[in-house]
Amino acid sequence: MAEITFTRDERDIICRKIQLYMREELEQEVGQFDAGFLLDFFAEEIGPYFYNRGLYDAQAILESRLENIAEAIYEIEKPTQFVR
């Protein structure tokens, strides 16, 4: 898996969200620099779990759609003497 990276704008937004959460929920002031370190930790240590969950969810959707396509093809199949 490739390293999880964010654009500068994404990083800034995420860091602000971390700061806001820390201040409002934990009553802790965290600077932009520390929020960046926390983001790096989450991206490296916890990010793969979210990434993998996204892959599993995408795979489930794809399998469901492929099943629907297979059923649709079966429905339009013309009868013949050949049986699969």
Image (tube, grey):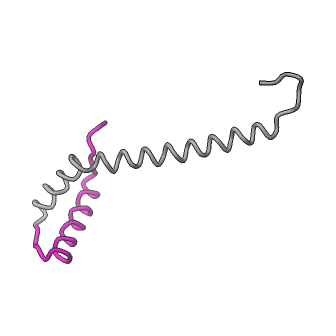
Which residue is at 52% across, 45% downward?
Answer: 60
Q: Give the magenta part as a residue range.
A: 1-30
Q: Position of residue 58 (x, y in %)?
A: 48, 46
Q: Quadrant of residue 69?
A: top right
Q: Quadrant of the C terminus?
A: top right
Q: Main secondary structure of the magenta part?
A: helix
Q: Tell how many labels.
A: 0
Q: Is residue 25 magenta?
A: yes
**Residue nearest the observer in this picture, 18 or 16:** 18
* Residue in view at x 82 percent, y 34 percent: 77
Which of the 4 image quarters holds residue 52? top left
Q: Where is residue 74 shown, x and y percent of the image?
A: 77, 37
* Percent x, y of residue 26: 15, 74
Residue placed farthest to the front in the image? 83
Residue 37 vertical placement versus 68 (above, below):
below
Is 73 displayed left or right of 79 in the figure? left
Horizontal side of 1 relative to 75 (left or right) equals left
Asked whether, in this view, residue 28 is left or right of residue 71, the answer is left
Q: Horizontal and vertical percent for residue 15?
A: 21, 62
Residue at 35% over, 47% down: 51
Judge by depth and name the residue closer to the eye, 54 or 17: 54
Give me the residue at 44% from left, 45% from top.
56
User: Is residue 6 found inside the magenta-colored segment of the image?
Assistant: yes
- On the rendered image, what quadrant is the N terminus found in? top left
Residue 24 sits above or below residue 31 on the image: below
